[in-house]
Amino acid sequence: MAQTVSVRLSKESLREVDRLAERFKTDRSEALRRFIERGLREARIDDALDRLRKGKASMGRAAEEAGVTLYEILELVRQHHIPYGYAPEDLERDLRELGKRG
């Protein structure tokens, strides 16, 4: 069930929201929902990559927490130059683990 939330934005931010909403041909509320969802996705990915970097999550767990596939998290790890020792056996183990949860 959706809930209403109040947020204070600067005039500049609100003008930018309105400008983008107009370009997307939507209203302010829908534009804000889209921006928040995008921001939340990025925050989940950042958190998962940070946990990987610190050795606090496996590749499979990080993918699950980030809401991406194992292949996507591997690509993100490569893009962010996060060192990892991920062998084919690790991939097989993580795929089995994710299969049990799905």
Image (spheres, grey):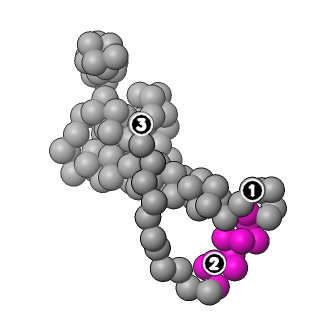
Residue 19 in the image: x percent, y percent? 76, 71
- Image disc number at residue 67: 3
Seen at 81% across and 62% down, the residue is 23
Which residues fall within the magenta stretch? 12-21
Decide if residue 27 is in sight here.
yes
Report, in whole angstroms, how far the alpha carbon at label 1 lies from the one at label 2: 15 Å
Compared with residue 18, is residue 3 higher up or lower down, i.e. above or below?
A: above
Report, in whole angstroms, how far the alpha carbon at label 3 lies from the one at label 1: 26 Å
Whether residue 41 sits left or right of residue 98 in the image: it is right
Residue hosting label 1: 26
- Say few, some or many: other residues with alpha carbon within 10 Å of mark 3 (under 14 / 14 to 19 / 20 or more): some
Whether residue 89 sits left or right of residue 42 in the image: it is left
Q: Nearer the viewer, residue 55 or 48?
A: 48
Query: Of circles 3 and 2, which is in front?
Result: 2
Decide if residue 59 is in sight here.
no
- Image disc number at residue 14: 2
Three-letter residue code for mark 3:
Gly
Seen at 34% across and 33% down, the residue is 64
Seen at 18% across and 44% down, the residue is 56
- Say few, some or many: other residues with alpha carbon within 10 Å of mark 2 (under 14 / 14 to 19 / 20 or more): some
Three-letter residue code for mark 2:
Leu
Q: Secondary structure at mark 3?
A: loop
Give the number of callouts.
Answer: 3
Residue 90 in the image: x percent, y percent? 27, 22
Q: Secondary structure at mark 1?
A: loop
- Say few, some or many: other residues with alpha carbon within 10 Å of mark 1 (under 14 / 14 to 19 / 20 or more): few
